[in-house]
Image: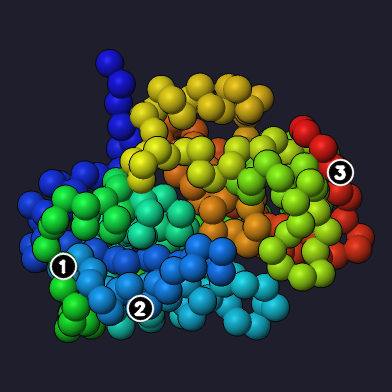
Amino acid sequence: MSSKSRFVVSPDWVAERLGSPGFAVVDASWYLPAHQRDAKAEYAAGHLPGAVFFDQDEIADKESGLPHTLPAPEFFAAEMGRLGIGEGDTIVVYDGPGFFAAPRVWWMLRIMGAEDVYALDGGLDGWKAESRPLETETPARPAKTFIPAFRDERVTSFEAMRDIVGSGKRQIADARGAGRFEAVEPEPRPGMRSGHMPGARNLPAGSFSKDGKFKTVEELRAMFDEAGIDLDRPVVTSCGSGVTAAIITLALESVGHADNTLYDGSWSEWGSRDDTAIVTGKA
């Protein structure tokens, strides 16, 4: 018998709870230029009832020099409170296609202290396909206090990543597409070398879902096994800029793997430097 991730909820589950006290829905949509989708415009055109918009480019550390870097806990907490979300709420995040940007905000909320956080199976596209209700107005949620409890041990810095690459103390799971990983396709951001970190394994972000639905726990385990990831050992996840790495994190947590971290700088940092080790070809 197949089982779904305990962190993934169905449209029916969400619909039953909409409007309930302590229940929050977050539109976490964010796209690359190649998607040709405008997250803010889509939110304005129609979003889940009561959903607030989480801007991943704004709720970020803008001083880092890297795209949408994890912000300071105090800033994150203030922004959540402004959106009417407390750390004790039941929170559901979603994006357009189902599992692209939403897992990043799921991860951020969890490492900042929220525990009851889920991702919507099928995303906004799936919700629309089932002709479920939408709203166009921005909800007026009363401000709340979000008390952060930052789990900094779940975030890998550049210095720690360099040590991991050199020592092999953690397995590296890279969510970029195979073409970028193997350096047969260029990086979408200028000034970056192509390839991957020595020892990294490739688990493309798009392979974790099908038609917007997250794969079963059994399928996820098989994916990790096929990629050569030992679930009894620590893992650090990475991608282009720290967004889709969280899809692997969600998958790891779904199969019961808790000893994982996310390299926030990801390839935007590693690939743009001239003092980092890079290899090409298949892992």
Give the SS element for disc 2: helix
- Per the rendering, the mark at residue 207 is none
| Residue at mark 2 to residue at mark 1: CA–CA distance | 14 Å
List the residue tagged with mark 2.
Answer: 41
In front of the other: 169 or 203: 203
Give the SS element for disc 3: loop
Q: Pinpoint residue 102: horizontal percent, then vertical percent.
A: 40, 57
Mark 3: few/some/many CA within 10 Å (<14, 14-19, 20+): some
List the residue tagged with mark 1.
Answer: 134
Residue 258 in view here:
no
Q: Amino acid at mark 1?
A: Leu
Q: Is residue 280 above or below residue 255?
A: below
Identify the mark nearer the N-term, 3 or 1: 1
Give the SS element for disc 1: loop
| Point 11% across, 63% down: residue | 133
Q: Left or right: 248 with respect to 90? A: right
Q: Quadrant of the C terminus?
A: top right
Q: Left or right: 259 with respect to 139? A: right
Identify the mark nearer the N-term, 2 or 3: 2
- Per the rendering, the mark at residue 279 is 3
Check the image and tell me how it is coloured: rainbow
Mark 1: few/some/many CA within 10 Å (<14, 14-19, 20+): some
Q: Amino acid at mark 2?
A: Ala
Q: Left or right: 116 with respect to 12? A: right
